[in-house]
Amino acid sequence: MLDLKTLVREILGNFCLMGVCWSNRIKAESPSNTGFNSKNGSGSSSRASSTSMPLTPRSEGEILQSTTLKSISFSELKTATRNFRPDSVLGDGGFGSVFKGWMDESSLKASKAGTGMVIAVKKLNQDGFQGHKEWLTEINYLGELHHPNLVKLIGYCLEDDHRLLVYEFMPKGSMENHLFRRSSHFQPLSWSLRMTIALGAAKGLAFLHNAERQIIHRDFKSSNILLDSNYNAKLSDFGLARDGPTGDKSHVSTRVIGTQGYAAPEYLATGHLTTKSDIYSFGVVLLEMLSGRRAIDKNRPTGEHNLVEWAKPYLRNKRRVFRVIDPRLEGQYSVSRSQKAAVLALQCLAVDPKYRPDMNEVVTILEELQDTKGIPKSTQKEHNATSQGLPNGAPDSSKRSVDDALSVTAYPRPSRNPLFA
Ligand SMILES: Nc1ncnc2c1ncn2[C@@H]1O[C@H](COP(=O)(O)OP(=O)(O)OP(=O)(O)O)[C@@H](O)[C@H]1O
Ligand SMILES: [Mg+2]
């Protein structure tokens, strides 16, 4: 039986046509446009033997037969999560709840809480085609893709109506929690950590876009950037991912899917999907990181609900950029670097996709913005020069060298949350 939340999602999903959407998550695509045929359909595999990149196979049968992922029984996962105990929920999303659990690393058998390998178990709690399709797409992509900036999928469960996914546990949870949750468990992330996370996420996205057959993530957002114990960023949620366009063919979705506030304007307006749609979403996330504000926040005053619309005029004006920067970061960044980061966000958010940079360019710029030791003296001078004559309220790093300014990372580490430990 459908619960109320699921029912509402299903109904709303059906009303999401070409950008007109009634929920935050813009989900639903007509089955004829999925790239998947009916269950257990036959046909030769479309996987290329010369590459490890997944080419969208045609059927569930093909995907599950060809994956090297482990199939894990429902009862094993039930034991591993102590019967999906409510107090072991790590988070909830559109797909379902995510539970913390334990299993033996080599046998993948459930182990006693606190022993063996820690896992995160995502359990589909909605009926219907969309959930199953996302579950399968996740296996199709994450089962094959391996990169330090992509979360590791360990296995899956398909039993009766049960659809689950088993991931490596990411001890620091999602970046969304760190940026927006106000609690003693989530202290504000420092400027330098935000830049490190941005770079890691950018490398993950660049890896997808550089693949022999490009992959478009299509749901890049702060809740899909997970953090390991050292705050290394790993992308998750490939349930909406698609192979990029090939040759002169381009994707035009009959229904737009993704998450409101992050989706590129041309995709919303026309359904036209390219890697540049991901770049736009990256710009939104970068802006969230710089500002500490959510992409969409209805609790803010009128005119500030949509982060991009609110921030763009400030980003365009070098002297007003500081207005966008999270006040909790005061004293942690140099003016020059904040301006560079703002320009990068603005470029990614260009209305015309052809003016957006590609992910390799984004990675290069973010590498320059890292808090590295041994910055050349000339760069230090440049930083000090640009930080003169600051408007009221701008962080004044002019009294320090750039190294000093950058070493101000009075960062209070998030205190221990029993689940993210
Ligand atoms: N591998 C993991 N390790 C630790 N925590 C995780 C892991 N995967 C997910 N989580 C937590 O569970 C939460 C829910 O994740 P999920 O991907 O289901 O939804 P979401 O990304 O928050 O939202 P949506 O479904 O709208 O995309 C995440 O925000 C994160 O806090
Ligand atoms: Mg997610």
Image (spheres, rainbow, N blue to C red):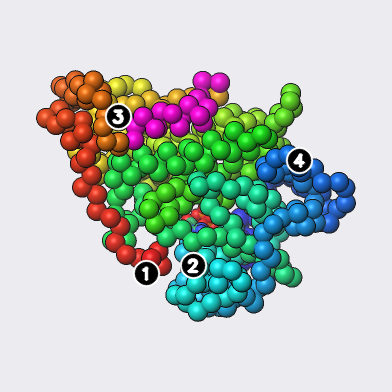
Give the residue type that dot 2 points to.
Val
Which one is in front, 222 or 398?
Answer: 398
* Crowd rating for badge 4 (residues with CA inside 10 Å; few <14, some 14–19, many 20+): few
Q: Which residues are magenta?
A: 354-370
Label 4: which residue? 48
> Which of marks 3 and 2 precedes in the sequence?
2
- Cβ–Cβ below 8 Å for labels 1 and 4? no
Up/down of 367 relative to 186, above or below? above
Label 2: which residue? 118
Horizontally, residue 128 falls left or right of residue 420, namely right
> Which of marks 4 and 1 precedes in the sequence?
4
Which one is in front, 96 or 249?
Answer: 249
Residue at position x 55%, y 24% in the image? 353
Q: Quadrant of residue 420?
A: bottom left
Residue at position x 43%, y 29% in the image? 364
> Which of marks 1 and 2 precedes in the sequence?
2
- Cβ–Cβ below 8 Å for labels 2 and 4? no
Give the residue type that dot 1 points to.
Pro
